Amino acid sequence: MSSVVVIGTQWGDEGKGKIVDFLAEQANVVVRYQGGNNAGHTVVVNGAEFKLHLLPSGILYSRKTCVVGNGVVIDPAVMLKELKSMQDKGIDTSGLKVSNRAHVIMPYHRLLDEVEEESRGDRKIGTTKRGIGPCYMDKNSRAGIRMVDLMDEEEFCEKLEYNLEAKNHLLKAVYGVEGFDYEQVKQEYLEYARQLKPYVTDTAAVLHAAIKNNEKVLFEGAQATLLDLDHGTYPYVTSSHPIAGGACIGAGVGPTQINKVIGVVKAYTTRVGEGPFPTELQDEIGQTIRERGHEYGTTTGRPRRCGWLDACVVRYAGYVSGIDYMAITRLDILDGLKTLKICTSYKYKGEILNEFPASLKVLAQVEPIYEELPGWDEPTSDIRKYEDLPLNARRYIERLSETSGIGIGIVSVGPGREQTIILENMF
Ligand code: IMP
């Protein structure tokens, strides 16, 4: 048995898609376990760029089983569109398995995401407006519609009617907007059901069989630690559990069946949406990193806030997910910067904080304590061996490893599959 979970350690967009894609080559099964099409992975294969939002990155390889687990919320229109775009590029999508227990994003979830966000005013979260939060709300309030319901016309119609009555009332009475027509939504979704039916199954059973059969299973986290509903910078978080433990609930496997956890760390920090960000750079260096790293959202196109590497964040991510190794990405983006900084601790009201603060008021006021390290001039994107990296690049990475207490497993120096330096075998 060999199963590996890959998660983001920061606020998302660490380059998990590239690492997952790289590891997927060795895996038999690739699984998404939370989130929905709020995620965005850009993967480059032989110079061709693929943008994935909902399908597991493993879909780009033929003969892999790709699971969308019960913890994912599925917008059927998006899933079908993504499937079609893959099929148009000649990619075999027959290995896709979609959980019958996954919840379905409905049109009212998308509209509620928008109007609720608008009504928050200054307190807005900066959501992707894909209906993710409202869909998880329905799941938790036990009103949601699951794939298994969508596949059963009678069950679906009954749940849709009940939900539309409540949601249309809420939309009109609280937000003053028109709701949705039952017949129209019903017809639209029954057509999605017809097209998705071949993929829908009990994916926990699929995984159980794969693990029993000694297959290699790769769990692909979306979003990241600080966007986790429980462990992130609440309320500026997503509504699911991107941490490694989320894989157990979101895929239906036990903790004893996970062998290794890999935390993806971008060589600097970025964040989209609102919320405190202690190492944020609002100067020219931040701008340089944004432009060089094309730090604009894959899903929404929004410019990402950029800042120095924060080892306090990585250390925290390390223990809430039990990370074995880091996969450090985008090191090449820092080539040519004269000096680099790593935040190794936070000071608050004159005292060093030992733990990552739960209070956002505190996080917004902490003073990052930096260590300055010399940069490197040499380009790193063509380097394939760790010992060939410039000495200062290695020092930078090793200092992160020392201060976060997590070993280095992979270093990525560009978007291509070949631009990957391996220090530890993951499977
Ligand atoms: P939601 O997931 O659309 O509800 O958005 C909640 C928060 O998570 C917002 O700050 C989003 O910008 C952020 N978020 C959601 N998905 C991603 C992602 O894939 N990368 C980075 N941030 C994300």
Image: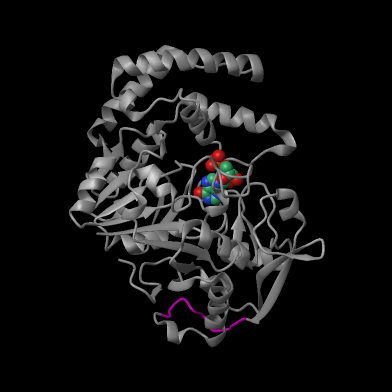
Q: Is residue 139 visible?
A: yes
Q: Residue 178 appears in which quarter of the rendering?
A: top right
Quarter of the image with the N terminus is: bottom left
Query: Which residue is the extreme one toward the front?
Result: 256
Q: Is residue 118 above or below residue 96?
A: above
Q: Position of residue 293 (x, y in %)?
A: 56, 64
Q: Position of residue 232 (x, y in %)?
A: 59, 49
Say whether residue 163 is magenta: no
Tell me: 114 left or right of 183: right
Q: Residue at x 62, y 53 (%)?
A: 303
Q: Is residue 300 visible?
A: no
Tell me: 63 left or right of 124: left
Q: Is residue 369 above or below residue 101?
A: below
Magenta segment, which residues?
375-383
Q: Position of residue 73 (x, y in %)?
A: 42, 36
Tell me: 351 left or right of 13: right
